[in-house]
Structures are given as C-alpha cells and as structure tokens.
C-alpha cells in the first residue's frame, strides 16, 4: 500500500503581504506566515499524520515553513531534501511588481493570463538582469540551460514532474508518508498531475498559504481523493483571497 501525501504551500511571505509577484525572489515569512506554518503542523497532528521524509524548495519561505512544521510536530529529525525543481514558478520581469498596480498598467485580462494561464509565461528577464538565477550561488551546480528567465505553469510542471518521478514517487511507493512543502504553482503542477486536471480547471484552482492538502493514493500512485485540512469556511475564504489578489483596488 502506498503512503499518504501531504502538500503544503509555505505560510504567508512578506511579499505575499505586500501583494508583490515573488517567483524565485527569496523572501522570508511574515509574522502571520509563521503562525500559519505552526497551525499547519497542528492540523497534521490532529489527523495523526507522521511523514517519514520531507521535500522542499531552495527558497527560505518554504524551508522556514517546513522547519516550523517539524518543530511544531516534534519531528526535527526528519530527513529533508531541498531541490530547486520545487521552486515557485519564475515570474520573469514581473518579479517584485505589485499585482494590483500591474493590473492598472496592463489590464486585468492580461495580468490574469500572465498569472494563471496554463502555457503563456510573463515577459522574460534578460540574461544580464541581476535577478536572473544564473547569478544566484544556490544554482551554481545547475546546468545554466535549465535555469528559467520566466515560466508558465506548463513549464513549471515540466521540471516538477521528473522530480516527482525520480524522488517523491519512490518514497510513496515504498509505503512512506511524504510531506512536500513548496509553492502555489509548483504544488498546482502536482495537483494537475495527480488529479489529471484539465488546463482550464487548474487555472481556476487556488491553493492558500499554510493549509495542508492530504492525498490518499492507490498502489499506482493515482489519487483516490484529496482534501484540505482545517476549517472549511476559513479554507474557502483563503482560496477566494488568492483568487482576488490581482483585482483592481
């Protein structure tokens, strides 16, 4: 029997709080984000979940969320793997811009395409832009050809899926419960894959910060169902807040 899968988007970051496009920019959790991470750990304890291994990105908002969850659940000893392929979608030249102000400049329809379309990326960073990941030491061992200057959700899935197949799926197939603490779009890529969700449906699927998603999987690692852990009304409100981030103020 395969293990259970717990997906958790990092707690609110400082740039989430300021409603900025974050992408690969490395910002930390806000005070609320730390509280959300601790609450995620408590929700896992209520469910009796005790993952045997955890995976996260190389961005501190996800790493710190994982640390807080492990501290809350008294599992600081858990094996942890960090990998850039679980990073957030790269938002290209939009990184650092305010979402609502970007709507004012480019229009709500265009920004929704950049934010939520399946296969249309935002404008790319130039190769000499200091924000390009090739200048970041954490990617020094990654083939520069693999480092994005912008990404669509389709591009994000293209890097997440091989990591799923090579590292996460074998642990689940061995019967281990697995926790993945990552980002809105890298997790949406996994949800699309696991639920065989259409491109149009995944565009409208919102993952709030700090709320665990529990997957039950069959022996072929196909989804037998997923559910958010926590208060249903609060989860619905949080999902709606994600949807409204790029609306005109």
Image: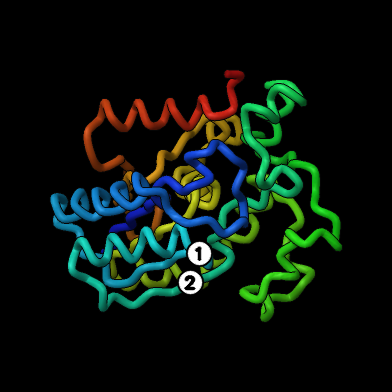
User: Disc 1 and disc 2: Cα gap in Å?
Assistant: 5 Å
Q: Is residue 225 left or right of residue 23?
A: left
Percent from the top left, x then y, of residue 186? Answer: 53, 52
- Residue at 57 percent across and 33 percent down: it is 203
Secondary element under disc 1, as helix, strand or loop, is loop
Residue 139 versus residue 11 in the image, above or below: below
Q: Crowding at label 2, few (<14), some or many (≥20) Cα neighbours within 10 Å? A: some
Quadrant of the drawing holding the N terminus: bottom left
- Residue at 26 percent across and 73 percent down: it is 76
Q: Which mark is residue 82?
A: 2
Determine whether label 1 and label 2 are within 8 Å by CB.
Answer: yes
Image-quadrant location for residue 52: bottom left
Decide which of 191, 142 is in the foreground and name it: 142
Decide which of 80, 51 is in the foreground and name it: 80
Q: Can residue 213 be seen in the rendering of this structure?
A: no
Residue 49 versus residue 185 in the image, above or below: below
Image-quadrant location for residue 106: top right
Q: Can residue 234 be seen in the rendering of this structure?
A: yes
């Amino acid at each position: 029997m395969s293990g259970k899968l717990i997906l958790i988007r990092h707690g609110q970051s400082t740039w989430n709080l300021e409603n900025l496009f974050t992408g690969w920019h490395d910002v930390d959790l806000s005070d609320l984000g730390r509280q959300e991470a601790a609450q995620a750990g408590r929700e896992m304890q209520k469910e009796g979940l005790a993952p045997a291994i955890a995976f996260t990105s190389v961005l501190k908002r996800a790493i710190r969320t994982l640390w807080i969850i492990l501290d809350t659940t008294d599992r600081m000893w858990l094996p942890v793997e960090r990998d850039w392929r679980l990073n957030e979608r790269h938002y290209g030249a939009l990184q650092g811009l305010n979402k609502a102000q970007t709507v004012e400049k480019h229009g709500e329809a265009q920004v929704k395409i950049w934010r939520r379309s399946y296969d249309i990326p935002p404008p790319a960073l130039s190769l000499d832009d200091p924000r390009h990941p090739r200048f970041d030491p954490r990617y020094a061992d990654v083939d520069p050809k693999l480092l994005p200057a912008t990404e669509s959700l389709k591009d994000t899935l293209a890097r997440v899926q091989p990591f799923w197949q090579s590292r996460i799926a074998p642990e689940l197939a061995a019967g281990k419960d697995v926790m993945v603490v990552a980002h809105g779009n890298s997790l949406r890529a996994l949800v699309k894959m696991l639920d065989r969700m259409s491109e149009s449906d995944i565009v409208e699927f919102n993952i709030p910060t700090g709320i665990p998603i529990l997957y039950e999987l069959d022996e072929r690692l196909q989804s037998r169902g997923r559910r958010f852990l926590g208060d249903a009304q609060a989860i619905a409100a949080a999902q709606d807040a994600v949807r409204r981030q790029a609306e005109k103020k």
